[in-house]
Image: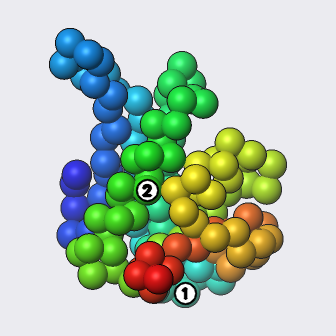
Amino acid sequence: MSGHEDPRHGYWLIERRDRGGTTEPVGMILVKPIPPSGGAAPSETEIGWRVMERHGGNGYMSEAARAVITALFAAGLDEVVAVTHPDNVASQAVAKRAGMREIGLSTAYYDTQTLLFRASSSDVAR
């Protein structure tokens, strides 16, 4: 993981390990401040992911995103958001399987309409 100003922010390389112990990159997860629409200073943390096409549909990214969210909460973060293009069903499925709640369509970030997901540490504690 590489850090930004907040040590919880950075990139996570996601790898899969075969039975022989060899690892292969699957994709990456980025945790960073999310820019609100209108140019205000970021005040929330975003998680996003990118999976290599040949590894899509295997659940690797959902498992990894869930683990990263758990690590973020253990490191003291209270909440994390994810945004997807409204048509990106695969990314929305990752968010849901990672335990994030679908909030709905939003223009709160990136000055465009996205589908917003949110996870909070209080949800995990229940």
Q: Which badge, 2 or 1, is on the more N-terminal residue?
A: 1
Residue for badge 1: 40
Q: Quadrant of residue 36?
A: bottom right
Image location of residue 23, percent across then percent down: 25, 22
SS at circle 2 = helix
Number of numbered discs on residues: 2
Residue at 77% x, 72% y: name it. Answer: 104
The CA span between labels 2 and 1 is 29 Å
- Residue 124 is tagged as none
Residue type at mark 2 is Arg
63 sits to left or right of 68: right
Q: Can residue 110 be seen from the camera position used here? A: no
Residue at 70% x, 69% y: name it. Answer: 102
Residue for badge 2: 66
Image location of residue 22, percent across then percent down: 21, 17
**Residue placed most toward the observer, 37 or 11:** 11
Image location of residue 5, percent across then percent down: 24, 73
32 sits to left or right of 34: left
Q: Residue furthest front?
A: 126
SS at circle 1 = loop
Image height of 77 relative to 52, above or below: below
Q: Can residue 113 be seen from the camera position used here? A: yes
Image location of residue 100, percent across then percent down: 57, 66
Q: Quadrant of residue 82?
A: bottom right
Foreground mark, 2 or 1, reads 2
Image height of 47 relative to 64, above or below: below
**Residue placed most toward the observer, 93 or 5:** 93
- Crowding near the residue tagged with mark 2, few <14, some 14–19, many ≥20 C-alpha atoms within 10 Å: some
87 sits to left or right of 36: right
64 sits to left or right of 100: left
